[in-house]
């Protein structure tokens, strides 16, 4: 029987056969630890009634584990050189479709509707993400109109900490708010550097994100909410007040409007943005923008 792609001996053989050299600029750190792969798939709880989107299949180490459990797997891989490797490694898995495209440029709605034969099935994103674009990829999926129920994604531990952080912590920021607004986020487990070739400089974490039935807080206007959150974190050392007047304007009428809103929401303007909860950001947005436009 052919060994799994992630088996270190097979990985080495494939690298040699195709003369593959890793590109650091594409975040290429391939998993060669079968236990970690089993654990990822277990967290993802796949079955033949689940479709999966994977970002960056590499040589297919995670992809084959996904293919064995899921209905179909759609994998986006930016690196053209990996296409011939994947053609070999994915040959036993007819339910895998590899698209040679930058996932950030991909029209997810269009491609999924073309590839998934049962588009009514829930979609999960399962991936060992390229670290240099983790945040844009997360935002790309959150902002897509595609219905994504769950994400099980590997990233630098430091980024996972930022996503799961709560108010008042150093790691809490606009990324925490953006993700937690849509999804419940928890770290499933930590992955040591030694699980990869080549080894990255830092440890990684598997983040498990589950879509909320409704967003964590009720806001009249999501765009205004996210803009207010970004403004509040603009300069972390500044008070909330200073960040807000930099964003809204320093004229007297604006200052009065902001003072009134903060007082009504019982938020001390001297606090720093990083101490505000999602609910407080929502209260402030809804006070400042009572209508949805
Ligand atoms: N899944 C494989 C594994 O676990 O061994 C490889 C993971 S590696 C961390 C990230 C993969 O993402 C690489 O294969 C890289 O070429 C690919 N990649 C990088 N940027 C990408 C992008 N914008 N769109 C799609 N794939 C990308």
Image (cartoon, rainbow, N blue to C red):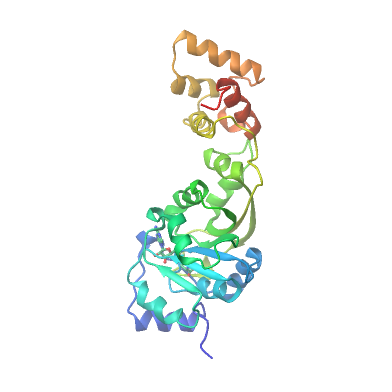
In screen coordinates, is 156 left or right of 46? left
Q: In front: 120, or 277? A: 120
Residue 280, image quadrant:
top right
Image: 173 above or below 193: above
Q: In front: 237, or 261? A: 261
Image: 270 above or below 103: above
Q: Residue at x 65, y 36 (%)?
A: 217
Does residue 172 appear in the picture of this structure?
A: no
Residue 151 lies, in percent from the top left, at 58, 57
Image: 265 above or below 232: above
Q: How many marks?
A: 0
Q: Residue at x 57, y 60 (%)?
A: 123
Q: Residue at x 53, y 42 (%)?
A: 175
Q: Residue at x 54, y 91 (%)?
A: 1
Farthest top residue in view: 252
Residue 264 lies, in percent from the top left, at 65, 17
Name the quadrant where ligand 1 sits: bottom left
Does residue 125 appear in the picture of this structure?
A: yes
Residue 68 lies, in percent from the top left, at 58, 76
In screen coordinates, is 58 left or right of 65? left
Residue 168, image quadrant:
top right
Residue 113 lies, in percent from the top left, at 48, 60
Farthest bottom residue in view: 1
């Amino acid at each position: 029987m052919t060994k799994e792609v992630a088996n270190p001996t097979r990985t080495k053989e494939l690298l040699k056969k195709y003369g593959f050299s890793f590109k650091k600029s594409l975040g290429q750190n391939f998993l060669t630890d079968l236990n970690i792969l089993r654990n990822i798939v277990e967290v993802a709880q796949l079955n033949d009634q689940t479709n999966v989107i994977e970002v960056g299949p590499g040589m297919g180490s995670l992809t084959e584990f996904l293919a064995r459990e899921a209905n179909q797997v759609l994998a986006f891989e930016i690196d053209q050189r990996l296409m011939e490797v994947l053609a070999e490694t994915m040959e036993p898995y007819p339910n895998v479709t590899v698209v040679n495209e930058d996932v950030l440029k991909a029209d997810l709605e269009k491609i999924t509707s073309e590839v998934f034969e049962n588009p009514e099935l829930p979609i999960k994103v399962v991936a060992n993400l390229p670290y240099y674009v983790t945040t844009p990829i997360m935002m790309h999926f959150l902002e897509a109109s595609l219905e994504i129920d769950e994400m099980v994604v590997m990233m630098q531990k430091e980024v996972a900490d930022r996503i799961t952080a709560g108010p008042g912590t150093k790691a809490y920021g606009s990324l925490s708010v953006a993700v937690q607004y849509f999804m419940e986020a928890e770290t499933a487990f930590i992955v040591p550097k030694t699980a990869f070739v080549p080894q990255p400089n830092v440890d990684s974490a598997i983040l498990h994100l589950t879509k909320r039935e409704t967003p964590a807080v009720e806001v009249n206007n999501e765009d205004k909410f996210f803009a207010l959150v970004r403004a509040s974190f603009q300069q972390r050392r500044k008070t909330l007040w200073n960040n807000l007047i930099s964003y809204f304007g320093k004229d007297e009428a604006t200052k009065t409007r902001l003072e009134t809103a903060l007082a009504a929401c019982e938020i001390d303007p001297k606090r720093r943005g990083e101490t505000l909860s999602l609910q407080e950001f929502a209260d402030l947005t809804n006070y400042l923008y009572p209508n949805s436009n």
